[in-house]
């Protein structure tokens, strides 16, 4: 597994990261605990060192699952990227973001206990709390860094102005944000800002929640799958977007790889300061994703990909309307 560095002040990590949200119930329907743990083990054995989670994935279940999967592993062999502060309502639903300093400290204590570790490597607010200046939230994380409970500061789904304000308080190691062939809003302002400041990017949604994986179909959606509420997966939008996938499949076939591998490799090709985070739920999907880290895309390949899926060609927002207000960058 190749390595990349998270920004100019961050750690060296594997060229692909593992996202674990789908390993807990509530995101894509019911999850398979045994398969999830086996997938984490397979990722570590393959050389993946960056593991991403959040305290609200499965309402804490995801962190406890990782604690079990990581038991007995050398703590220096993996890095934990943890998001915090996304509030939930009983019965489901997003309840906002809490970035108050006292809450930051409290959230971290709970995550450390659930994960069974004495520190997390990258700690980041899941979303911006509009009621709390980012300087206050970052200041609390800086205290935790100074205390040895956190090693690096990260951000998630914020815009250029917030990045600059946070970075002025403490160096930001990386921004986690959605970036894929059909989600390219970061290219206009956010990515140039990151590069100006020497901040890395951990890109999630590189397969757009499976939509551009080459495997998705509406028939595969199970009860509880939140994609049923996402505009890109609905009706005519889905049909249009899947036509883009078929155009991409022709490029992948000519390249001798799968659609998923091509889409992941495209994100990786955008710069060595970008680490794609692959949300593999099973060993099968992980095995498919791994070769993407070493897939070399030529200028001709990139041109063919661009013709198949031009910027702005997807239809539908990446989140439901109510949640689009929680992110600074559109589609």
Image (tube, helix red, strand yellow):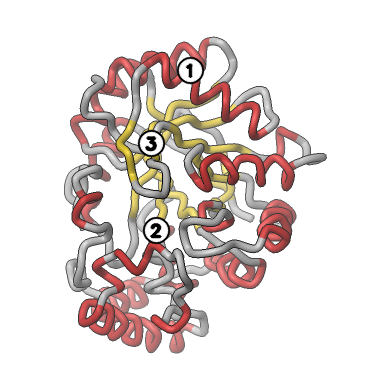
Vertical position of residue 208 compared to residue 69: above or below: below
Query: Which marked residue is nearer to the observer: mark 2 or mark 3?
Result: 3
The residue sitting at 57% across, 43% down in the picture is 13
Instruction: Tell me: 274 left or right of 320.
Output: right
Question: Image quadrant of residue 169?
Answer: top left
Residue 107 visible in this rendered orientation of the protein = yes
Residue 266 visible in this rendered orientation of the protein = no
Label 2 sits on residue: 205
Vertical position of residue 172 compared to residue 41: above or below: above
Q: Residues within 10 Å of mark 1 (few under 14, many from 20)?
A: some
Question: Image quadrant of residue 67?
Answer: top right
Q: CA distance from mark 2 to mark 3?
A: 21 Å
- Pointer 2 or 3: first along the chain: 3
Secondary element at tag 3: strand
Label 3 sits on residue: 87
Looking at the rendered image, the quarter that the N terminus falls into is bottom right
Instruction: Tell me: 46 left or right of 169.
Output: right
Q: Residues within 10 Å of mark 2 (few under 14, many from 20)?
A: many
The residue sitting at 33% across, 56% down in the picture is 179
Label 1 sits on residue: 105
Secondary element at tag 1: helix
Q: Residue furthest front?
A: 91
The residue sitting at 51% across, 15% down in the picture is 144
Instruction: Tell me: 40 left or right of 209.
Output: right
- Pointer 1 or 2: first along the chain: 1
Q: Is the residue under label 3 in contact with that under label 1 (CB below 8 Å)?
A: no
- Pointer 1 or 3: first along the chain: 3
Q: CA distance from mark 1 to mark 2?
A: 28 Å
Looking at the rendered image, the quarter that the C terminus falls into is bottom left
Instruction: Tell me: 138 left or right of 106.
Output: left
């Amino acid at each position: 597994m190749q390595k990349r560095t998270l920004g100019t002040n961050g750690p060296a990590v594997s060229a692909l990261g593992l996202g674990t949200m789908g390993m807990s119930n509530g995101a894509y329907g019911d999850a398979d605990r045994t398969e999830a743990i086996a997938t984490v083990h397979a990722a570590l054995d393959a050389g993946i060192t960056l593991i991403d989670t959040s305290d609200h994935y499965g309402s804490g279940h995801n962190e406890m699952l990782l604690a079990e999967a990581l038991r007995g592993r050398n703590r220096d062999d993996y890095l934990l990227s943890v998001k915090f502060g996304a509030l939930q309502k009983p019965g489901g639903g997003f309840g906002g973001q809490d970035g108050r300093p006292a809450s930051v400290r409290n959230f971290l204590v709970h995550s450390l206990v659930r994960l069974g570790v004495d520190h997390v490597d990258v700690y980041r607010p899941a979303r911006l709390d509009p009621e709390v200046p980012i300087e206050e939230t970052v200041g609390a994380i800086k205290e935790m860094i100074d205390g040895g409970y956190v090693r690096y500061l990260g951000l998630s789904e914020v815009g250029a102005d917030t990045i600059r304000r946070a970075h002025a308080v403490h160096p930001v190691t990386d921004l986690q944000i959605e970036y894929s062939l059909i989600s390219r809003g970061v290219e206009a302002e956010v990515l140039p800002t990151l590069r100006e400041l020497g901040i890395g990017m951990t890109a999630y949604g590189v397969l757009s929640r499976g939509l551009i994986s080459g495997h998705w179909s509406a028939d595969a959606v199970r009860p509880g799958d939140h994609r049923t509420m996402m505009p890109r997966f609905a009706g005519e939008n889905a049909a249009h977007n899947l036509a883009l996938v078929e155009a991409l499949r022709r490029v992948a076939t000519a390249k001798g790889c799968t659609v998923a591998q091509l889409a992941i490799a495209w994100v990786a090709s955008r710069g060595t300061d970008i680490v794609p985070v692959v949300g593999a739920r099973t060993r099968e999907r992980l095995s498919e994703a791994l070769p993407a880290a070493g897939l070399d895309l030529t200028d001709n390949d990139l041109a063919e990909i661009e013709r198949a899926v031009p910027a702005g060609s997807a239809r539908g927002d990446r989140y439901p309307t109510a949640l689009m207000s929680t992110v600074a960058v559109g589609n």
